[in-house]
Image (cartoon, grey):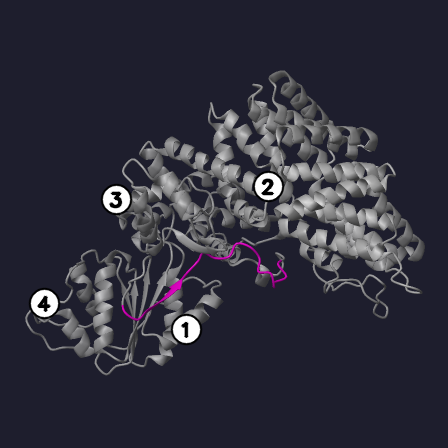
Amino acid sequence: MAGDWRAQSGEPAARPREPEPGRLPAEVTGFVGRQRELAELAGLLAGARLVTVTGPGGVGKSRLALRAAARAAGAFPDGTWLVELAPVQDPLLLGRAVLEALRLTDGTARPPLDLLTERLSGRCTLLVLDGCEHLVQACAELADALLRALPGLRVLTTSRAALRASGEHLLTLAPLPVDPRPSDPGGPSDPGGLPDAVRLFAERARAVLPSFALTEADAEAVSLLCRRLDGLPLAVELAAGRLRALSVEQITARLDDRFRLLTGGSRTALPRHRALRTTIGWSHELCTVQERLLWARLSVFAGSFDLEAAEYVCAGDGLEAEDVLDLLDELVGKSVVLGEDSAFGVRFRLLDTLRDYGGQWLRAAGQEQRLLRRHRDWYLGVATWGEVEWFGPRQAETAERTELAHPNLRAALEFCLAEPGEEQIALLLAGTLWFYWVGCGHLGEGRHWLDRALALDREPTEARAKALWVTGHLATLQGDLETARPALEECRRQALDTGDDRALAYAVHRQGSAALIGDEPDRAAELFEEALWHYRTIGELNSNVVLAMVELGLAYLFQGDPESGELWFGQARELCEEHGEQWAYAYVLYAMAYAHWMDGAVRAARALAREGLRLNHLFHDLLGIALAIDLLALLETEPGGPGAPGDLGGARVLQGAAHRIWGAVGLPFLGSRSFFGPHQECAERARAGLTAQEYERCYQAGARLDLDAAVSRALGGSGSAGGPEPGSGPCSVPSAPTPAPARNS
């Protein structure tokens, strides 16, 4: 039991004094954001008698509770009272602290609970208990006893852990938003569109430097700073206080040691709010030894993680795997770890600020390297299993799971590249993730990791061979044949020298891809035939093998042999349907649509291209999306029937949309004349049927569409081209601010 706050003694009897109407402390700084949370909290206070605001240290629980209490004060004619519990370390003094906060004095030996129930009887009162986390059990018992005895009482508490008292309703407070709200205009000149964290920084900065003004020039720097601080209000306010000596950019640059840097704060604030280290140390002190150990070990995770990852990485050397779940649950309850719902169950994460604090303890314990290696091993397993699962009916799920693991995969790669002796594992991990780099729109990032890994170790291992062909593949898809060809040739030579038949098959295959992009369809066909022979010989069957068939069919198509091309497309389609493969299937559909257009089957071509685009969008495959939209643009120019002209304006809109997406992939149309053909023909048709002004306006209208809007338009959704409105031209699209570019990873 945390302590008995019922059994308190006092001084000799004195005449009791009735409570005065409650007063809350006046706000000395502006209140920023939190309108949704305030409304939710008001609703809870109206319907529940015990409400607890939970969240990590420094997230603004006290400010929110006090603002909500002030707004609700009219509903409590007998007072709204604040009890600050930070100074109360002994649970036995809790009841006395409440009496003092209510300005009730009593010199008798009666227990404080008896005094409170007597003095508050028949009154309509709101009691705010601020900072209950170190007295959770005592607060729960006191609240329960008071609420049972006083029907007119409401209790609002703030705590990093729920009280778990009967009838308790929780409001979990998250950090302030660091990204603009979608519905807001979002420009620096529009304060209402700025993220709340940025607005908070600007307001606190003006208190330090009255001349401070958030301009368009520095808004991005402030936004980056707030993002690095997780939108944690206390951290943002402390950072703003550093503007006395540092610029925004300097503060951001020094965040690697944020606990040393952010040590300012008002001398009149609670002691735990004077430094970020002290604030988080407060939470640390409330944890058991085992919870602190898990907190430190969890610091090796970047982004979110699941229970299985935590059990594997953190168990051992004083921490049993079967104990991780209960300890993790306790850390969630204490607002150290955040729980998040996902399509695959609950995931967890530490705010960066709490993660850094745990990391300091992990380093101090001398366990960092061991934990980083276990973390690396787990995510190498995630990548390896993802590669296996990529070819099959769980492909979309694999893409989503890998996306969730992306921050941790980056951390694992960074560890391997920074740690001597880990270079081969870096090559293996970066190469194994080919399916994610290619299939989920991360070509640029894949090149980044592979280039770094290849530069560190030139030993001719299987891992290096795989990294070489993957690098060549990614470079080819970016239209960078100057990089692709040497990498693929090195892989081929190494495979021949070492007898690595698998690497040889992939090297030859991707050399064929480079030849196809380089407008050498005859040479490409020879290489694809050779690669498919190697694949059959070693028993390889996966998405790459399917793509080799698709590419071989395209090589025949570009040579003017559609019959041979369609034969290979058919084989690839059968394999995809047999194994539940969807990503490569999208390219099969694109190739079949291309062939149907060449054959004059426009309606069938459009249906195939749209289904391929839908699948590409599912995987966020920007290359496939751009190719499909450009082909659909051409199909828009085809007559819709006897006497029904094609939609030239709509086609030009789609071309503009595709051009923007190409910018996030690499060289438009892979630098290939063959793949550029449909775009060129579409542009010529549009130029012939539109005025110069319409031609350019439609293209620019398409270039303003973001990725989702572009795909929707191409699929014939709400943004699809239709008849022109009077005076608007044939390419009318809803007016909107220019959106951000498509993701270039």
Q: Which mark is residue 289?
A: 3
Task: Give the residues in magenta.
Answer: 166-186
User: Is there CB contact under 8 Å for labels 3 and 1?
Assistant: no
- What residue is rendered at 71% in x and 61% in y? 736
Q: State which mark lies toward you, 1 or 4.
A: 1
> Are the two marked residues, 1 and 4, in contact with CB atoms closer than 8 angstroms?
no
Is residue 168 in the magenta section? yes
Q: Which mark is residue 436?
A: 2
Q: Earlier in the sequence, mark 2 or mark 4?
A: 4
Q: Label 3, label 4: how many angstroms apart (C-alpha)?
A: 36 Å
- Is residue 390 left or right of 172 when viewed as pictured? right
Foreground mark, 3 or 4, reads 3
171 to 510, vertically: above or below: below
**Type of amino acid at the residue the image marks with label 2:** Tyr
Residue 373 percent location from the top left of the image: 42, 32
Real-space Cα distance between discs 1 and 4? 37 Å
Q: Is residue 466 visible?
A: yes
Residue carrying label 1: 42
1 or 2: mark nearer the eye: 2
In what element is the residue under mark 3? helix
Tag nearer the camera, 3 or 1: 3
Q: Position of residue 701 (x, y in %)?
A: 78, 57
Q: Is residue 602 or residue 263 the one in the foreground?
A: 602
Instruction: Please report whichever mark, 3 or 4, sits nearer to the chain's N-terminal start.
Output: 4
Residue occupied by mark 4: 10
User: Which badge, 1 or 4, comes first in the chain's sequence?
Assistant: 4
Q: Quadrant of residue 188?
A: bottom right
